[in-house]
């Protein structure tokens, strides 16, 4: 984090459909306000097709100095030289990702609402941990619910950044920022409507709401 950036930053996650006019929508979103990272998340396509879909999006992110993170797949992240990978609990280890992607790769780990999983990820060398879901979401099936207290606990004890995810909107995000989230990971709140307006609304909240010290 630099002095010019807010305490908490926006981390966009792609919808599952990233073909068609999506590259233009991504440009609109990234040009509407500060975004720290973009996660490429597609399901049910082979790696060759994923590479094809990722190429224009990766270029758009690179032009704007937005980190391009691949969801789940270490092999895809390596193949396209992504900035990093986000791992679920069954997507391989931090150690494997580090060995294959290098020391500069950003490696994130889904930790649900588990303090144990988060501490484990930190010990293994993850660059950030993600907690959630904090709110109901239609983006994916929710198996775990997290409360803002886990963000406050993490922020008080660890330097490693934490990401809040799950049903986050401009209207409900303030308690997560206040609790200590370093990043808000959002998908539906941006892509289910006017992406530029949504990013502007998040930017306003991120600059107006302060983290508790």
Image (cartoon, grey):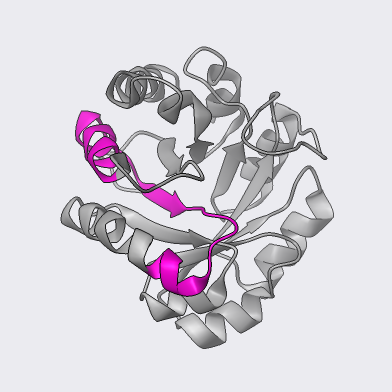
Q: Residue at x 28, y 40 (%)?
A: 21
The answer to whether residue 107 of the structure is visible from this angle is no
- Please provide percent x and percent y for residue 148: 70, 28
Q: Does 84 appear above or below 203?
A: below
Q: Residue at x 52, y 86 (%)?
A: 100
- Please provide percent x and percent y for residue 192: 46, 24
Q: Residue at x 81, y 48 (%)?
A: 114
Hey, which residue is sitting farthest bottom in the picture? 99
- Please provide percent x and percent y for residue 128: 56, 57
User: Magenta stretch: residue 30 in it?
Assistant: yes
Q: Quadrant of residue 71?
A: bottom right
Q: Does 170 appear above or below 144?
A: above
Which image quadrant: the C terminus? top right
Q: Give the left or right position of residue 90, taking residue 174 as reference.
A: right
Q: How many marks?
A: 0
Q: Nearer the viewer, residue 191 or 172?
A: 191
Q: Nearer the viewer, residue 74 or 24?
A: 24
- Please provide percent x and percent y for residue 24: 23, 40
Q: Does 33 appear above or below 208?
A: below
Q: Does 104 appear above or below 197?
A: below
Q: Give the left or right position of residue 37, taking residue 45 as reference.
A: left
Q: Give the left or right position of residue 105, taking residue 160 as reference.
A: left
Q: Nearer the viewer, residue 195 or 122?
A: 195
Magenta residues? Answer: 23-51
């Amino acid at each position: 984090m630099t002095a010019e950036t807010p305490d908490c930053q926006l981390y966009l996650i792609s919808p599952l459909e990233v073909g068609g006019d999506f590259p233009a929508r991504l440009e609109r979103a990234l040009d509407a306000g500060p975004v720290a990272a973009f996660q490429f998340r597609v399901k049910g396509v082979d790696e060759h097709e994923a590479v094809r879909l990722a190429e224009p999006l990766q270029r758009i992110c690179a032009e704007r100095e937005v980190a391009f993170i691949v969801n789940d797949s270490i092999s895809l992240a390596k193949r396209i030289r992504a900035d990093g990978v986000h791992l679920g609990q069954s997507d391989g280890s931090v150690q494997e990702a580090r060995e294959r992607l290098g020391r500069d790769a950003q490696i994130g780990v889904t930790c649900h609402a588990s303090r144990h999983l988060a501490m484990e990820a930190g010990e293994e060398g993850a660059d950030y941990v993600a907690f959630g879901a904090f709110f109901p979401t239609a983006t994916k099936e929710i198996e775990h619910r997290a409360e803002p207290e886990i963000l406050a606990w993490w922020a008080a004890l660890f330097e490693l950044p934490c990401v809040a995810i799950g049903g986050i909107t401009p209207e409900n995000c303030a308690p997560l920022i206040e609790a200590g989230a370093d990043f808000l990971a959002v998908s539906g709140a941006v892509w289910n409507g006017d992406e530029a307006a949504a990013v502007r609304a998040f930017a306003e909240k991120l600059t107006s709401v302060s983290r508790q010290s």
